[in-house]
Amino acid sequence: MARRGVGALAAGVVVAGAYLGGAALSGHLSVSARRPLLDGLSPPPPYRWVKPPPSLAASNQAPLSGEYAMEFNGGKSVPGVFRTDDSQAVIILLTGAIPAEPGKTSVTLTLHPLAPGAVGPPPAGYSIAGNVYRVRGVYQPGGPEVTSLTGQNQIVLVYPTPVGHPRHTLLFSPDGKSWRTLPSVDSPFQQQVSDARVDALGYYAVAVRGSAGAAAGSSSGSVIPFIVGAVALLVLMAVVVLEVRRRQRQPPSRPGRHPPEPRPRR
């Protein structure tokens, strides 16, 4: 029974080590990313730019839009996950997120990418990283546009591979002219930033402090030392566990008798 207990404890230590290693890795990447690595370690696909940097112009693919018809059911808009066809922009709307309007039966919801130069400048000290996305809703038939939302809705934007380790922040503008920052969760490994308290439709963008710079090839190189460190820690823990098991398998040594102490000579 003692051996089984040690084996179970050892297995638990290894599992806990793996969990803590992953949490430490994600925590190093971002303070707000200290959570299990549920999204895997696969890098995101190449970013699609409206206006790519010159070094990426030859390989760039144009970004895609998204369009949806949202119905009202029982006087409330239906919930859903609405995204661009390349998944670079996603908005999650809860039941009743769009207020009902008399005589309106649906809403046309669109997500459309724009170049940063097509809108007003970001707040002082910030630069936009990637595309700007206009999320627009129009009541049908005949309008008007949807402005405010109700409930805890969420938006997620993907951003291009950064240079270095900047902190990414979501920006919002109701008109594409003046911007404000939003409370954001940055997930560097997935290269996406989100806000779960979206209360309006309009223009959204990802920004960093200072210059956004040109996209690098792959950001995974800066993460390799931490992955190697986590793996080394797990290997060391496994060695310790195996040593404990080896010692448990050894037969206990029998206690011997101590030789009599020599008598003093007279």
Image (spheres, rainbow, N blue to C red):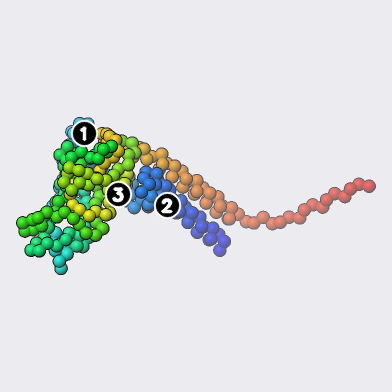
The residue where tag 1 is placed is: 53
SS class of the residue under badge 2? helix
Residue at screen point 60% across, 54% down:
250
State whether residue 75 is above or below residue 137. below
SS class of the residue under badge 1? loop
The residue where tag 2 is placed is: 19
Q: How many marks?
A: 3
Q: Which of marks 3 and 1 is in front?
A: 3
Dot 1, how many residues are within 10 Å of its Cα: few (below 14), some (14-19), or many (20+)? Answer: some
- In this view, which residue lies farthest toward the left? 142
Dot 3, how many residues are within 10 Å of its Cα: few (below 14), some (14-19), or many (20+)? Answer: few
The residue where tag 3 is placed is: 183
Q: Nearer the viewer, mark 2 or mark 3?
A: 3
- Disc 2 residue type (three-letter): Tyr
Residue at screen point 15% across, 68% down:
74
Kindly report the distance in space between the C-alpha atoms of the residues bearing marks 2 and 3: 27 Å
Q: Which of 141 and 30 is in front in this view?
A: 141
Name the spot of residue 218 as percent of width and height, x first.
30, 37
Q: Which of 102 and 72 is in front in this view?
A: 102
Task: Specify which label sits upstream in the sequence, 1 or 2.
Answer: 2
Q: Are marks 1 and 2 in contact (CB under 8 Å)?
A: no
Name the spot of residue 183 as percent of width and height, x first.
30, 49
Q: Are marks 3 and 1 in contact (CB under 8 Å)?
A: no
Task: Specify which label sits upstream in the sequence, 3 or 1.
Answer: 1
Q: Quadrant of residue 119?
A: top left
Q: In which quarter of the image is the N terminus?
A: bottom right
Residue at screen point 18% across, 33% down:
58
